[in-house]
Image: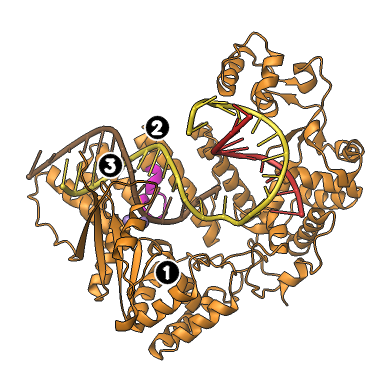
Chain colours: A orange, B red, C yellow, D brown
Amino acid sequence: MNSQASLLSDRPPGLLYYLDHFQTAMSWLHERYGDLLSPSETEFLSLFAGLPRASQALLVRLIMRRGQRFRASKIRYPELGAVDLAFGPLIELNWIDPRPALSVDDLVKLITRAEISELFNELPASLTKAEAHALLREAYTEPRAFEEWRGNVNERVYLVTIAPLCTQLRLLFFGNFRQGWSEFVLADLGIFKYEAVPFSKDSRAFGTRRDIEDFYALYECRRRLYEEEPLAEVLEQVPRVSSQHEWLQARHAKLLFQIARQHERCGDRERALSLYKECRYPGARLRAIRSLELAGRTHDAIDLARSAQAHPESSAEAQKIERMVKRLERKIGVPASKRAAAVRTERIDLIVPPPAGRESVEMIARGLLAQTDAPVYYVENGLINSLFGLLFWDAIFAPLCGAFFHPFQFGPMDLFSPTFRARRAEVVDECLNTLEANTHAARIRQTFLAKQGTQSPFVTWGLLNDDLLENALNCMPAADLRALFERLLNNLAENRSGLPDLVQFWPAEKRYRMVEVKGPGDRLQDNQLRWMAFCAQHQISVAVCHVRWAQTL
DNA sequence: GTTGGGATTG
DNA sequence: GAATGTGTGTCTCAATCCCAACTT
DNA sequence: TGACACACATTCAA
Ligand SMILES: [Mn+2]
Ligand SMILES: [Mn+2]
């Protein structure tokens, strides 16, 4: 049932390892998504299987590279023999265009600065490539074939016209926007190790064709937004996403939020506001209030802010709303209420010579605070998150239906869903109970050894070592860990950041403290303030260390 | 002539 | 000085090659 | 290829 073993070979990668990987993925898709594939996807699978091996391998090589257009001189794969022959069947299928029309933009991406000078001697040699590009864009508007651009040179450019379909198959296999085919070889080489979570053949990221189409559409919109295409056109293409698919809805909300932000930056506050209002992405309501405020609609802003205050979506929202309400009320003449007392925390002041090298303020503070019997580590979020990830390993990788569906996942698909904990209540409680029974340290050490290097959304392996782990387990009481982990569990997405830069241990006294370092011109951020308030509430020692430069004039 | 950022590769 | 908005660098898997910037 | 923390600029009000 270990699905990872079925994908990853024991033997070293063969000559065409990348083709083996791609074929593995194609049969995976055929087997799991056969009933949901579009006609063109199904056709691709069957036509691909019928191609000569060299043509298959060549296509895989090209789709793994960046871009869709390649100069023949940049296509050198000795293992494939004569590349021209391999291209034949691909051209026959219209999967590759051997003579594509190239815009100036396309052309400039394909040739070097020196070649631009050869082609267009009228351009001053002093221009940078970007400057030359800008001038050429004005001068030449018609696309031409590579051979026409460079009349006296005989070299081909190939366009991989099938690339968009291949991108869809990649999206479908990984079920996310960011992973690519190189996962296979990296896992093969042992560079990435993934937890082997058992899952059945009907475990898949999407269950209807409609969800898959929406997923593709979201990807396209994201890409076009990133390419800074006209906002109205991008917005036009955003799918409605009526599905109950939680992850799709979250992606959809995030996309709308980002489009709204772009509208704000362009000054189109009205459209931004209407997008924010129908968007459930965390922070969208805050932006809606802010947009109302900036539009001068103070009373509308206050109304929305007060209703948000009554039912805040998170402590982060509550924190920002409080500031907003205060400011808005001032605007309409409500007398300023008393300021909430700031959280009382220990303060450390350091005055040090200005930075000689590039040493960060955190490292400077670490050096000055460290004692022989009280070592200091620069960990930021890494320590607490790692301890959490180790103790709750079985909860994070619990084989829930639909949470895992391919062998290269670093966590379950619903990791940041509000229902993550409820869906794993039993395992989560079992992990929490180790803190009551004081068996947590043993559990953490055991997982640290057993899972060494295995990808996890919380464990920073590069930061952890025996010293740090033992100091932490010896000096941090179970009750403290319990409090910290409860807060993490309360909102994994929001609370995995904002922890202090440094942690200092006094092993002899079984004591520790966390220290947030602030250089000149830096201030506590919202998420840091929330963690500090929480720690104060639970008698967990946190200090703020202010670093200033000596003799700055 | 060097160097630093990408792209490619396993 | 508080609050807000925006830009930047750092993680990077590591070795290698190409190319576009430049006395770093 | 984001997530995160920090650096820096701008604005506004006491
Ligand atoms: Mn920090
Ligand atoms: Mn800091």
Q: Is residue B9 left or right of residue A538?
A: right
Tag nearer the camera, 2 or 3: 2
Q: Are marks 2 and 3 on the same chain?
A: yes
| Disc on the earlier residue, 1 or 3 | 3
| Disc on the earlier residue, 1 or 2 | 2
Is disc 1 placed on a helix, strand or loop?
helix
Front-lying residue, A310 or A424: A424
Amino acid identity at mark 1: Leu
Amino acid identity at mark 2: Cys
Chain of the residue on which disc 1 is drawn: A
Q: Where is residue A316? Give x, y as percent.
A: 31, 59
The residue beneath circle 3 is: A292
Instruction: Please determine whether, in this image, residue A264 is positioned above or below residue A405.
Output: above
Q: Is mark 3 within 8 Å of ligand 2?
A: no
Q: CA distance from mark 1 to mark 2?
A: 40 Å
Is disc 3 placed on a helix, strand or loop?
helix
Amino acid identity at mark 3: Leu
The residue beneath circle 2 is: A266
Q: Is residue A138 left or right of residue A161?
A: left
In magenta, the rendered stretch is A274-284
The residue beneath circle 1 is: A383
* Image quadrant in which the C terminus of chain A is located: top left
Q: Give the farthest residue toward the bottom.
A: A437
At x 14%, y 60%, the residue is A340
Ligand 1 shown in quarter: bottom left
Instruction: Please determine whether, in this image, residue A203 is positioned above or below residue A146.
Output: below
Q: CA distance from mark 1 to mark 3?
A: 40 Å
Q: CA distance from mark 2 to mark 3?
A: 16 Å
Is residue A311 in view? no
Front-lying residue, A245 or A407: A407
Chain of the residue on which disc 3 is drawn: A
- The tag on residue A455 is none
